[in-house]
Amino acid sequence: MEHQSLKTWAECGATLVAVASGRLAADTVIRGGRLVNVHTREVIDGWQVAISEGRFAYVGPDATHCIGPDTEVIEAGGRYLIPGLCDGHMHIESGMLTPAEFAAAVIPHGTTTMFTDPHEIANVLGLEGVRLMHDEALIQPISIYTQMPSCAPSAPGLETTGYEIGPEDVAEAMSWPGIIGLGEMMNFPGVVSGSQQMLAEIAEVQKAGKTVGGHYASPDLGPSFHAYAAGGPADDHEGTCEADAIARVRQGMRSMMRLGSAWYDVETQITAVTEKGLDPRGFILCTDDCHSGTLVNDGHMNRVLRHAIACGCDPLVALQMATINTATHFGLERELGSIAPGRRADVILTSDLSELPIEHVIAKGQTVARDGKIAVTCPHLDWPAKARQTVRLGKTLEAADFEIRAPEGRSDVTANVIGVVENQAPTKALKRRIHVEQGLISAQGDIAQIALVERHRATGHVENALVEGFGYQGQMAMASTVAHDSHHMIVIGTSRDLMASAANRLGEVGGGVTVWKDGEELALVELPIAGLMSDSPAAEVAAKADQMVAAMQACGCTLNNAYMQHSLLALVVIPELRICDLGLVDVTKFEMTKLIEDTE
């Protein structure tokens, strides 16, 4: 059940009216501040706020009549009162944390509402995993809504996942109390081609009157894009340039502009508002993917908001994009996203609208953080053993499992190589001439080996390919059971022996990330829940993640947030070239392609 301190309006409406009229005393009154009204986009000096039953009862010039002997009075001291921040699209699993620990990490940063898509765990544990995420989300002191994952696998026929999600699963989830809609519809080719399964999933959500999330990861804005828009997605976060943002809002979608740990797509799209002058109501700020280190060291939605302002966006407009726009999009404008009567009492006190120091956070009427320190407990579920035993390799891996054999008699070959692009999700499909030694293709120069190790069904299968752009040097290997979205195991290395060691290590600990150099393990982040998350505190996970980043740098990698790039190399719905358990995928055509071109 949802956090016990919050009643619905139907349960407490009479109380709110009585408090606003002065017949009952408020639980809390905030006075002496400057109220930011996101409905009118104005700052109102001196307005006061009265809170009762976890909701705003009175918002106006003088709340003296709401104060009784037991009312807590908070003196704002001239600070701004802004609504709690909303993340319109994100994946909790990307933080390497459970919902409880993720909430504990972001509450001090002012995030009071999240719209989450747990499609990572859906690929590992199916509907049961989604339910576990949903149930833990509902007991948190902030508002966490769940979108039912739409695509597990992300691209049917191009990968094998631990579980598959179908229309019947979507229909069942629509009745759960915390389900807000359908998670990002990544199989955009399926929608465009009229896939019965994809359209049936969308239909179940439309029948329930909920929101369909979009994911159109293609630069093609022609008929395919228009066909996708006709398929029902109400938003899209995969835009990377101004033209993408404009195209989406012109089709009635919300353009979700993301700043995650590795995705920097706000600056290139927000000019649609700041320079082209489009109506900002069609734009939403989100994070998509933030790992624990970003959350602990840099922030969450406050970081996105500051960045949007630094990119030239008016602070009040940017604030709308992180509050009321998001709430309205999900049909929750009367429930949250603003400081107005009847809404959940989510409010932040800050002394500066541009730098946004988060000095006092109230969620559902309760003080949840002060001066960067959490002031509440975030309850945990008892995660079952099944969720902690998900890495099944089927055998002990050896160096030979990572061999790439060239055609007999060849001294060099032309290979299709995955090219990493810094700070962006798309990759490049590169063609490189590769030297052959003793019949094998090995790492050379900036080209490393990449392998996808099957870990759901204990088949022992390893699929090998090549990747360029990480800058790895010397003898090294890195393995991760976070491998969006199929979440097999991705291993990248310059040494086949170390690749085997890294993979076996994750089999031993039940999942996570490990980095090896010169025969030794430099870093290990244990992620025992589904091989994706830890239920340890965010600071502990972040410290291990920092060691992981340092270890990657020690191996020669200088890319910004290279771990995120690593973990997305199996995401077969984002162009141009990816690896899956079946081989290499040309995502521009959504078909398999060869590793070695000239096999004759």
Image: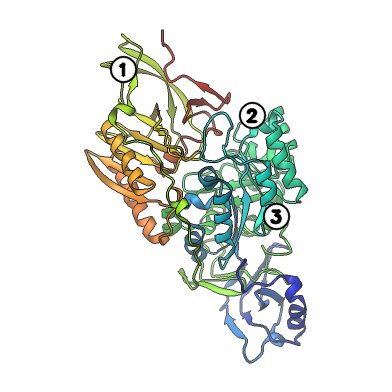
The circle drawn on residue 220 is: 2
Mark 3, residue position: 175
The x and y percentages for residue 317 are: 65, 56
The x and y percentages for residue 18 are: 76, 83
Circle 1 SS class? strand
- Gap between marks 2 and 3 measured at Cα: 36 Å
- Which residue type carries mark 2? Asp
> Quarter-wise, where is residue 315 in the image?
bottom right
- Which residue type carries mark 1? His
- Above/below status of 412 relative to 16: above
- Above/below status of 102 relative to 433: below
Mark 1, residue position: 435
Who is closer to the viewer here, 284 or 597?
597
> Quarter-wise, where is residue 236 in the image?
top right
Query: Who's the residue at 69% across and 28% down the image?
Result: 193
- Which residue type carries mark 3? Ser
Circle 3 SS class? loop
Query: Who's the residue at 42% across and 33% down the image?
Result: 459
Q: Earlier in the sequence, mark 2 or mark 3?
A: 3
Query: Who's the residue at 72% across and 37% down the image?
Result: 199
Which image quarter holds the C terminus?
top left
Tag 2 and tag 1, C-beta contact below 8 Å: no
The x and y percentages for residue 202 are: 71, 42
- Gap between marks 3 and 1 measured at Cα: 57 Å
Mark 2 or 1, which is nearer the eye?
Answer: 1
Who is closer to the viewer here, 320 or 191?
191
Q: Earlier in the sequence, mark 2 or mark 1?
A: 2
Answer few, some or many: residues within 10 Å of disc 1's Cα (few below 14, many 20 plus, some between 14 and 19): some
Answer few, some or many: residues within 10 Å of disc 3's Cα (few below 14, many 20 plus, some between 14 and 19): few
- Above/below status of 467 relative to 292: above
Answer few, some or many: residues within 10 Å of disc 2's Cα (few below 14, many 20 plus, some between 14 and 19): few
